[in-house]
Image: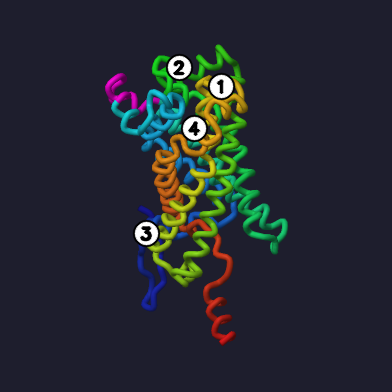
């Protein structure tokens, strides 16, 4: 152990040098900043946080996803959640509810890394283009830019996952599903559902991020009426959870039609988007599997934001969400107006 001489009023004392490193590391773990905001390190933390939060939460709800996909692909056989559950359990056993878990974990992990990491990056870039521009427009464009890249990364995983879940004898997972699709259909088979996937996830992401940002802003300004840094970590994460649930629930309603189309195309129930819409029916696009999607997406998005912001907090970074105006300035303006 190294020693360091420390000057005192009566001379010098000897201090263990390792204590310096202990102090530095403990401050980093407890609340010291790992890096400054909007640096490469910051975007790296956001990317890793997005990957871990999305991958783990999607893995956890694989059984519900299996029910959703089978109800979309086989609506006559599986007319309700309870019917789908009991039939799958009877015919395929408990393991059926974990089919496609590798596609969920790795696919949505990659998507989450791109979605969250690139959103933070694009939000900063577009905000710098014009400082005074409308924040909602920045949220829309930033989330759309990030989501396009995220979905290109996700699409092959989604194609394999949906087919594994709805076709028991197709493959066991990614390792045998990927080569089978590629050998028989080529790259087109892996990206068959890209357009409807974008049709599902682009509106979802735009609505999700925008709803989250505006909800955070509303809660701090109108309910809590404190600046974010004046709130405890528990309060900040509570705001994150409320905003996350609102964002997930609203986003799931907006994106439900495209979700039904993706499931239909990837399972070859239709050869084009037009035929898929015709076969499913216009009204069914909005209603089929909607209750289970809300059950899935609302809690999942809430957990994603919770994990994501927890990682930020332990990295010494502020939680997510833009607060448009200083609370103290609002109070001063109100007092002057009186």
Look at the picture and state if 305 lies above or below 15. above
Q: Residue 44, position in %: x, y?
A: 54, 46
Q: Mark 1 or 4 closer to N-term? A: 4
What segment carries the magenta color? Answer: 87-99
Tell me if I can see residue 45 in this picture. no
Residue of label 4: 107
Residue of label 3: 19
Q: Mark 2 or 3 closer to N-term? A: 3
Q: Are marks 1 and 2 in contact (CB under 8 Å)?
A: no
Q: Residue 82, position in %: x, y?
A: 31, 32
Q: Residue at x 42, y 49 (%)?
A: 302
Q: Residue 166, position in %: x, y?
A: 43, 23
Magenta stretch contains residue 306:
no
Q: Residue 74, position in %: x, y?
A: 43, 24
Look at the picture and state if 167 lies above or below 114. above
Camera-side residue of 80 and 234: 80
Q: Mark 1 or 2 closer to N-term? A: 2
Q: Residue at x 49, y 23 (%)?
A: 160
21 sits left or right of 320 in the view = left
Q: Mark 1 or 3 closer to N-term? A: 3
Residue of label 1: 270
Magenta stretch contains residue 94:
yes
């Amino acid at each position: 152990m190294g020693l360091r001489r420390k000057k005192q009023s009566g001379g010098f004392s000897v201090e263990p040098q390792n204590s310096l490193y202990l102090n530095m590391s403990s401050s980093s773990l407890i609340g010291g900043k790992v890096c400054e905001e909007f640096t490469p390190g910051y975007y790296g933390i956001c990317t890793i946080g997005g990957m871990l939060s999305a991958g783990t939460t999607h893995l956890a709800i694989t059984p519900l996803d299996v029910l959703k996909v089978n109800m979309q692909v086989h609506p006559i056989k599986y007319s309700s959640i309870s019917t789908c559950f009991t039939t799958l359990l009877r015919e395929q056993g408990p393991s059926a509810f974990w089919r496609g878990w590798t596609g969920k974990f790795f696919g949505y992990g990659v998507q989450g890394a791109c979605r969250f990491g690139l959103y933070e990056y694009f939000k900063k870039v577009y905000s710098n283009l014009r400082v005074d521009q409308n924040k909602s427009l920045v949220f829309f464009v930033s989330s759309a830019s990030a989501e396009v890249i995220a979905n290109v990364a996700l699409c092959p995983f989604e194609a394999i996952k949906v087919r594994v879940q709805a076709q028991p004898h197709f493959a066991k997972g990614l390792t045998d599903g990927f080569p089978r699709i590629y050998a028989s259909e080529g790259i087109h088979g892996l990206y068959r559902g890209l357009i409807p996937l974008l049709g599902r996830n682009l509106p979802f992401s735009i609505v999700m991020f925008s709803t989250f940002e505006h909800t955070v802003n509303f809660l701090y300004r109108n309910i809590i009426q404190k600046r974010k840094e004046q709130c405890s970590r528990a309060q900040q994460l509570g705001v994150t959870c409320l905003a996350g649930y609102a964002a997930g629930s609203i986003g799931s309603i907006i994106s439900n039609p495209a979700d039904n189309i993706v499931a239909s195309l990837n399972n070859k129930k239709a050869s084009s988007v037009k035929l898929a819409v015709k076969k499913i029916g216009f009204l069914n696009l909005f209603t089929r599997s909607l209750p289970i999607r809300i059950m899935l997406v609302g809690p999942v998005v809430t957990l994603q934001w919770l994990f994501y912001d927890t990682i930020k907090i332990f990295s010494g970074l502020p939680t997510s969400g833009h607060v448009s105006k200083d609370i103290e300035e609002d109070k001063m303006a109100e007092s002057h107006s009186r």
